[in-house]
Image (cartoon, rainbow, N blue to C red):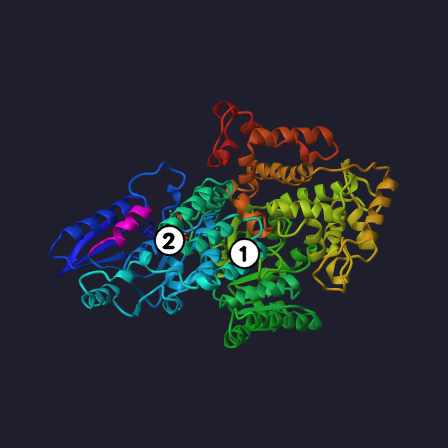
Amino acid sequence: MVDYRTVKSVAVLEVNNPPVNALSYNVRQGLQDGIERANKDKEIKSIIIIGKGRTYPAGADISEFSKPHKGPNLIEVGLGIESSRKPVISAIHGTCLGGGLEIALFSHYRIALESAKVGFPEVALGLLPGAHGTQRLPRVAGMAFAMEIITSGRHVSAREALQHGILDKLVKGNLLSESLDFAASLPFSVPHNRRLRNVPAKGAENADRIFEVALNKVKQKQNGFIAPINCLKAVKAALLPYEEGAKIERELFMELLTSGQAKAQQYVFFAERAATRWYVSNEKNQKKCSAVPVKTTGVIGAGTMGSGIVVTLLRAGLPVILVEQDSQNLERGVNMIKGILQGSVNLKRMTSQQMNKCLQQLTPAQSLDSLHNVDLVIEAVFENLKLKEEIFGKLDEICKQQTILCSNTSTLDIDKIARATKRPDKVIGTHFFAPAFVMPLLENVYGTKTSGETIATVMNLGKTIRKIPVLVKTCHGFVANRMLARYQTEASFLLEEGCLPHEYDQVMEEFGFPMGAFKVGDLSGLDIGYRIRQELAKANGYTVTTDTRYIQGERFSSLADKLYELGRLGRKTGKGWYKYDRPGAKEAFVDPDVTDIILKHCKDAGIIRRKISTQEIVERSMYSSINEGFRCLEDGVASKPEDIDVIWLHGFGFPRYRGGPMYYASTIGLAEVYDRICYYHKTFPESSYWVPSDLLRKLATSGRNIPMSDWSTAATVNKSRL
Ligand SMILES: CC/C=C\CC(=O)SCCNC(=O)CCNC(=O)[C@H](O)C(C)(C)COP(=O)(O)OP(=O)(O)OC[C@H]1O[C@@H](n2cnc3c(N)ncnc32)[C@H](O)[C@@H]1OP(=O)(O)O
């Protein structure tokens, strides 16, 4: 894991632990042994630590955090490096992160390729840099920079790291030979100030103010997370004598390590990577199927969704033909695209040149015929099956044989859309989340006949356009909206039973969602839900009015429709579940008119309102969704719980520190979740979604704590084997 070799009077310790040279037990042991050996060897004058392959160590081995500790810890290894009598140089390329950067900061010198990046991403894992990183970074880069880097976890370019004193030298070309030359230029002994423990933290004079500013920022941007706060406290402790600061860092680190948040965030790290791996059958899976290249694209529909998708494709360097029949709508769409890109320029996320390059790749058009030669088309028109079938039928005629046809439908059956073509193997759902140029999730939806090649292509496209692609099977609403429907329905029933919109939203925001369901409703527009309900009614042969209380025997709340009919469409009309200063304003205010509407609605329906506890709000919102999540696993619509969690994290802003709804259920305990679902089923028999999922029942009553990795297989085995 660490290869030891000598080049003249230099010992080279090369870390060899692919893919990212994580600091696993064997690596730590190898580094410790290598430093000792080099110090004992009279011929050796200096030591270089370098990574083999793509990177310098990118941090501790995250998979070891949940296992019993083995071998020297990172601090012991680091202290061994620092106390080495012979100069130690870290030679950095790739991503020098977390424990990797700590090893570099224990080293006496740091030299890097210009393309390298450094950073402390521990905060994303619910941790802090616990091998003295919080004590050492402020000593080279100052309190303010250290606080910013450690709480944001951002990767810093080598050039910026050099400016802040984290690196001593940037080099081009061959890193090892440059490092050997650098080593040859050093004195034989280690100067006092090259051991960072001997150097005071920079910026001590303003530390209190820097801390307060950073704390306020963290509370605003990372509300609910414990790690960033402990990160700040640990950095502040760097003002104390080294040993005292390190002791405080240890205490704060241990507090995080054993917290539920860190475990959840580490689960998310692996879940996000697992979600990009897909398996449908022995023939259709990631290992066997290859993507076809996508060099040209088309988008149909220049509304908000279509325009957002266009921006996403353009930003990834893909040329796009945007088709919209109506010239005014087309012009509006193109202006929206320009506006979004200009916004990115204003926020310094891209340069004007990059924006112009994107716009050069955009071809507005009014006819589907212009799509005859593109590799992939994404349809993003109004959610209407007939319309989509018509478009796909035409595309099938117009587009070249190899073109992949994608629909951005959020609910409709992909098989039905595919049947409108003679190429069902090339039809797939690519469900973006609004706003499409911001939300990271891409829910890819395969139909019965979708080929493995088509799946591989859109999963690959997801990565190309910097989204997190998750694959699910077609059904009404797929995974995201099928589960969300439960969540939203329960929210509307809770309003009827006793909550007000702001009371509900406050509870769910305290749970960790960035916005409660009613604020989200106002943001998306109440007309969207209204139209979906009307379409569903039409498709299923019933009618919905503001007096409807039951649909086909199921409880229904018409409150949202009442607001719609009053012209309260949300933010865009300045009135929805809340009121706003003006149409389009963001700040929501409680509206007594809405309270009156709700109270009248309840009175007319003979509903006696009651006080609803926080626990009930959270349970009914989350457990109804979780029950549906287990049904998705049971039906094979979702292939693993991680996929569901990633969908909620990146599609709906589920709090990362709770892992996702399925992980959250595992932390509560499936037996407890199942019991409560049974209770709500008994209490609300007129909502059939409270019938407990068979899979959940099996798992919860098995008498064993079945790990999440076995939940999907449990869906197909009988209870006696659980
Ligand atoms: C006392 C405590 C001391 C220290 C604390 C720490 O050091 S915590 C760890 C800090 N480091 C990180 O958080 C880095 C995590 N990794 C990344 O951000 C990315 O992997 C990286 C290095 C930027 C590379 O990204 P890329 O997109 O190229 O690869 P990918 O993320 O798909 O990773 C490839 C496979 O490597 C696995 N992996 C990555 N980092 C680690 C790690 N630190 N520990 C264990 N495993 C790691 C990752 O899961 C991928 O595996 P695969 O099986 O292929 O999905």
* The magenta segment: 74-85
Percent coordinates x, y for residue 288 in the rendering: 40, 48
Nearer to me, 720 or 228: 228
Using a 10 Å C-alpha cutoff, classify the residue at mark 1 as few (fewer than 14 neighbours), some (14 to 19) or many (20 or more). Answer: some
Percent coordinates x, y for residue 663 in the rendering: 53, 40
Above or below, 656 against 611 in this view is below
Describe the element under mark 2 as helix, strand or loop: loop
Task: Please name the residue that numbered disc 1 is placed on.
Answer: 215
Q: Which mark is residue 104?
A: none
Using the rendered image of the protein, determine whether residue 558 is visible from the camera's viewpoint: yes
- Three-letter code, disc 2: Pro
Nearer to me, 492 or 458: 492
Residue 182 falls inside the magenta stretch: no
Nearer to me, 426 or 592: 592
Q: Main secondary structure of the magenta part?
A: helix
Q: Give the CA distance from mark 2 to mark 1.
A: 23 Å
Describe the element under mark 1 as helix, strand or loop: helix
Above or below, 721 against 317 in this view is above
- Three-letter code, disc 1: Leu
Residue 78 falls inside the magenta stretch: yes
Task: Please name the residue that numbered disc 2 is placed on.
Answer: 241
In the rendered structure, which disc, 2 or 1, sits on the residue that comes first in sequence?
A: 1
Using a 10 Å C-alpha cutoff, classify the residue at mark 2 as few (fewer than 14 neighbours), some (14 to 19) or many (20 or more). Answer: some
Nearer to me, 501 or 80: 80
At horizontal 24% and vertical 62% (from top left) the residue drawn is: 191
At horizontal 75% and vertical 33% (from top left) the residue drawn is: 686
